[in-house]
Image (spheres, rainbow, N blue to C red):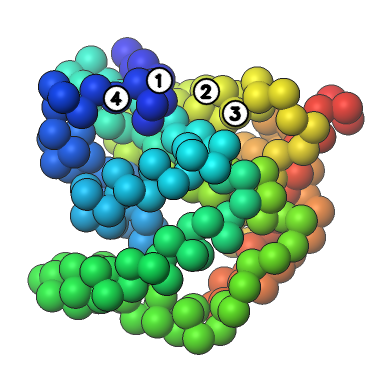
Amino acid sequence: MYELFRFEDINFQTESQQEIFSNIKTIKHDSLIARLRPDLLTKYFVVVCKSGGEVIFAKNNEGLIIGLLVFNRDNRITLNFLKEYKLALVSTLGFSFSMTDKILLYKSIINSILIKDLDNEYTKNEISLVAVLDKYQGKGVGTSMINEILQIPDEIIHIKTDEGNLGARALYRKIGFREVVIEKIGTRRLACMRYEKNEI
Ligand SMILES: CC(C)(COP(=O)(O)OP(=O)(O)OC[C@H]1O[C@@H](n2cnc3c(N)ncnc32)[C@H](O)[C@@H]1OP(=O)(O)O)[C@@H](O)C(=O)NCCC(=O)NCCS
């Protein structure tokens, strides 16, 4: 019903960035990363992978991407990327007709003022984005993408989610993560969760 593949498996000779990533922005409406233009998204994925991270996708039978996971060795990579491409972001989101894009832009401006740096242990080895297209949620796609990351020989893996996202928190606990702290980052309160191989 679905298949997992990695960013590094994509052959850009046969498929364009536009074709492959056209669906990503519908997967997680409130993510600045998921709403990047396909060319910037590709650049971001290259940066993540070059720094030792992983980008995993799930696709359905028709080849449509239905799930996305980004694993960062250090999530300051995301912050720095967004800072570097802020002008492209402002022009893409600011001129978009979508209200979601305008709200995201507004939130990211506030967060850029509030978040100076993200330097703590929870930003290391972090699954910084995991999302599944609404229609495909609850079918095991999210769990199987996370399990791919848990195969990496690392002792500790982090994941964060909004404090109020009780469903996601329960899922991560079921997979083996435990909650370590509630952190205020910019405008959000996030539950930081940790998976330690030796504990399982
Ligand atoms: C969280 C998410 C990635 C999980 O992926 P998924 O493919 O739906 O999850 P799975 O099918 O592997 O696991 C489903 C389990 O998670 C629980 N779950 C996940 N998200 C939930 C939610 N928002 N509300 C209630 N339960 C949820 C389900 O109850 C189910 O538990 P069960 O197996 O005991 O019935 C996906 O639901 C999603 O994209 N949600 C919206 C975005 C989001 O909240 N992302 C997390 C931010 S870190």
- Residue 66 in sight in this render: yes
In the depicted structure, whether residue 108 falls above or below residue 23: below
Between circles 2 and 4, the one closer to the viewer is 4
Q: Earlier in the sequence, mark 1 or mark 2?
A: 1
Label 3 sits on a secondary structure element that is: helix
The span from disc 1 to disc 2 (Cα, nearest Å) is 8 Å
Between circles 1 and 4, the one closer to the viewer is 4
The residue to which callout 3 is attached is 149
Q: Are marks 1 and 2 in contact (CB under 8 Å)?
A: yes
The residue to which callout 2 is attached is 144
Outermost residue on the right side: it is 199
The span from disc 2 to disc 4 (Cα, nearest Å) is 19 Å
* Amino acid, disc 3: Ile
The residue to which callout 4 is attached is 10
In the depicted structure, whether residue 199 falls above or below residue 51: above
Q: Earlier in the sequence, mark 4 or mark 3?
A: 4
Give the image location of residue 40, x and y in percent: 27, 53
Please name the residue shown 33% across and 73% down the image: 86
Give the image location of residue 180, x and y in percent: 81, 54
The residue to which callout 1 is attached is 4
Callout 2: few (<14), some (14-19), or many (20+) C-alpha neighbours within 10 Å?
A: some
Between circles 4 and 3, the one closer to the viewer is 4
Callout 4: few (<14), some (14-19), or many (20+) C-alpha neighbours within 10 Å?
A: few
Please name the residue shown 50% across and 27% down the image: 145
Between circles 1 and 2, the one closer to the viewer is 1
Q: Earlier in the sequence, mark 1 or mark 4?
A: 1
Give the image location of residue 170, x and y in percent: 65, 42
In the depicted structure, whether residue 37 falls above or below residue 119: above
